[in-house]
Amino acid sequence: MITNKVSATLEDATARSVLDTLKQVETQLPFLINLSEEEKRRMVRIGDGVMPFLVKCLEIAKQNDDFLPRAFDVSEMEKDVNLYRQLIPVYQAMQLLCVKMEDTISELRSEAYASALVIYGSAKNSRIGTAGLGDLVDDLATRFARRSSAKTKQSNNNQ
């Protein structure tokens, strides 16, 4: 028997409302950026425990800015540190929501596929004597069709 962990419906209006809310969140965070893969590769790698180091360096810079290069903008660093500090809990909440969404979608896909296999197997066993069912089963069978032997041989030769 198929285990059904998720048994729910989502009204179209609710789905639209959620999408609208997500758009509002994005609008409220206009500074969010997309980095290219190259930009990500060039970025300095740091761990999550960097906050104490950032705060201490910022305090030093605010109290003793005379040793810093003239072009160094302490107020810009302060903005970065503060925004970083504020975004972390928002990011964590969004990440948790994304994990739940991914898990739910995976479970729904699995449940639906398991149900579809029951239907397919039952239809295969009942196709004789049921008008039109044979063509439908043949159509469904294409999902499980194997490659032709010519394609398999070509694939094996390329390895």
Image (spheres, rainbow, N blue to C red):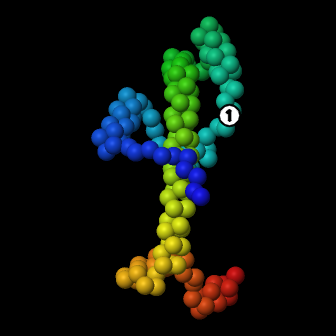
Q: Which residue is situated farthest in the front direction here?
A: 129
Position of residue 77 relative to residue 140, above or below, is above
Q: Position of residue 73 (x, y in %)?
A: 53, 20
Q: Quadrant of the C terminus?
A: bottom right
Q: Which residue is painted at 51% across and 28% down in the image? A: 90
Q: Position of residue 99 (x, y in %)?
A: 56, 41
Q: Which residue is situated farthest in the bottom direction here?
A: 150
Q: Quadrant of the N terminus?
A: bottom right
Count of residue discs = 1
Q: Position of residue 30 (x, y in %)?
A: 39, 32
Q: Which residue is situated farthest in the left direction here?
A: 13
Q: Which residue is painted at 54% across and 81% down in the image? A: 145
Position of residue 16 relative to residue 118, above or below, is above
Q: Nearer the viewer, residue 22 or 27?
A: 22
Q: Describe residue 123's horizontal placement relative to residue 44 as left or right.
A: left
- Binning the other alpha carbons within 10 Å of mark 1 as few (below 14), some (14 to 19) or many (20 upward) gives few
Q: Which residue is painted at 54% across and 50% down in the image? A: 4
Q: Which residue is painted at 52% across and 36% down in the image? A: 97
Asked whether residue 62 appears in the rendered view, the answer is yes
Q: Describe residue 108's horizontal placement relative to residue 23 as left or right.
A: right
Q: Position of residue 98 (x, y in %)?
A: 52, 40
Position of residue 38 relative to residue 89, above or below, is below
Q: Secondary structure at mark 1?
A: loop
> What residue does disc 1 label?
46
Q: Nearer the viewer, residue 130 or 41?
A: 130
